[in-house]
Image: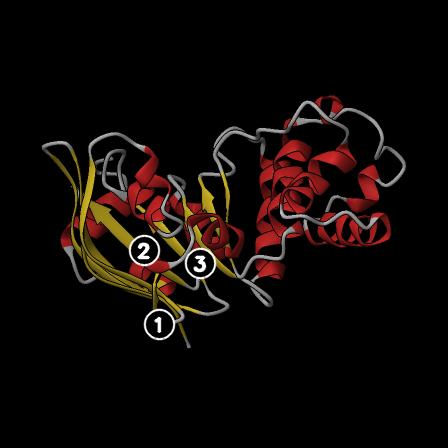
Amino acid sequence: MVKFAVKNLSIWFGPVHVLKDVSIDIQGNEILTMIGPSNSGKTTFLRMLNRLNELQPNFSMKGEVRLDDEDIIKINAELLRKRVGMVFALPLPLPLSIFENVAYGMRMHGLRNKKILMERTEKALKEAYLWDEVKDKLSESAFNMSGGQQQRLCIARALAVEPEIILFDEPCSGLDPISTAKVEEAMLKLKVKYTIVLVTNNVKQAARVGDRTAFFLNGELVELDKTDKIFMAPHDKRTEGYIRGKFG
C-alpha cells in the first residue's frame, strides 16, 4: 500500500534549485532509507513530507505530495505534523521532566486526562526501548539523561501523539555505537506499526535497517531499489561510487 506518493517534486529556496523532479512512492510499514552526500537534497525531501520547508524564507515548489491519496498542501499543517512525526539529528529534549517531555505533544493537542497521559507515555517509552531505563525516574529532568537516551526520548515524544509516519533526519549522527544500535533496534520494531523514512549519512546503517534505499545526488534521485540490490548490484555507477566511498 502506498502511503506517500511524490510526483515530479522540485523545490527552490530563492534561486537555488535544491530538489529536481523527484518521484517516489513510499510504502506503508517500510523503512525507506535515503543516502547521498551533503547538500544532495535528502533532508529537503524529508522535510517536505510534513511541510517543514514552508517555514524557510523564499521556499517554492512544483509537483505533488500525497498522503493516503490526499494532497498534503490541503491538509492543515498542524494536523499533518501530528500524523507525520519527525526526529532530528540532535536530540532536543525540553527543559522538563522525562514524563512531561513525552506528554508535551499530547497536551498540545488537547489531551488532559492524567490516566490516559500516563498510559500513552508508558506505551511510547516502551516502543522507544527506554521504559526500563527511566520508569523510576519519570519526574527527573530529561537533561540528566545520556545523549542516546535523549534521542530515544525524542522518539517517544513523537510516538506519543500516535503518528502514522516517522521521519528520522540522521538521528544517530552524534551517538556512540551502543546507542546507535538501540535506536536501530527500535526502528526495526516500529515498522510493524509505522512507516519510517530515514535520512542517514551512514551507508552501513542504511544497509542494516532499510527495506528500500534511495540514493540522492545534486538534488536528483539517482536510484531507488531494494536495499540489498542497491548495495550489492546498483544500476548506476554513481551509486556504486558513493557506496564504495569514492566520493561523498
The quarter in which the N terminus is drawn is: bottom left
Residue 210, disc: 3
Q: Residue at x 62, y 57 (%)?
A: 162
Q: Earlier in the sequence, mark 2 or mark 3?
A: 2
Mark 3 surroundings: few (<14), some (14-19) or many (≥20) residues within 10 A: many
Question: Which residue is the site of mark 2?
Answer: 73
Quadrant in the rendering for residue 203: top left
Q: Is residue 15 above or below residue 167?
A: above
CA gap, disc 2 and disc 1: 12 Å
Give the percent coordinates (x, y) of residue 52: 37, 41
Q: Nearer the viewer, residue 147 or 138?
A: 138
The quarter in which the C terminus is drawn is: top left
Q: Is residue 10 above or below residue 67?
A: above
Mark 2 surroundings: few (<14), some (14-19) or many (≥20) residues within 10 A: some
Say if residue 224 shows up in the picture.
yes
- Secondary structure under tag 1 reads loop
Q: Residue at x 33, y 48 (%)?
A: 48
Mark 1 surroundings: few (<14), some (14-19) or many (≥20) residues within 10 A: few
- The three-letter code of the residue at mark 1 reads Asp
Question: Does residue 27 appear left or right of residue 136 in this picture?
Answer: left
Question: Which residue is the site of mark 1?
Answer: 69
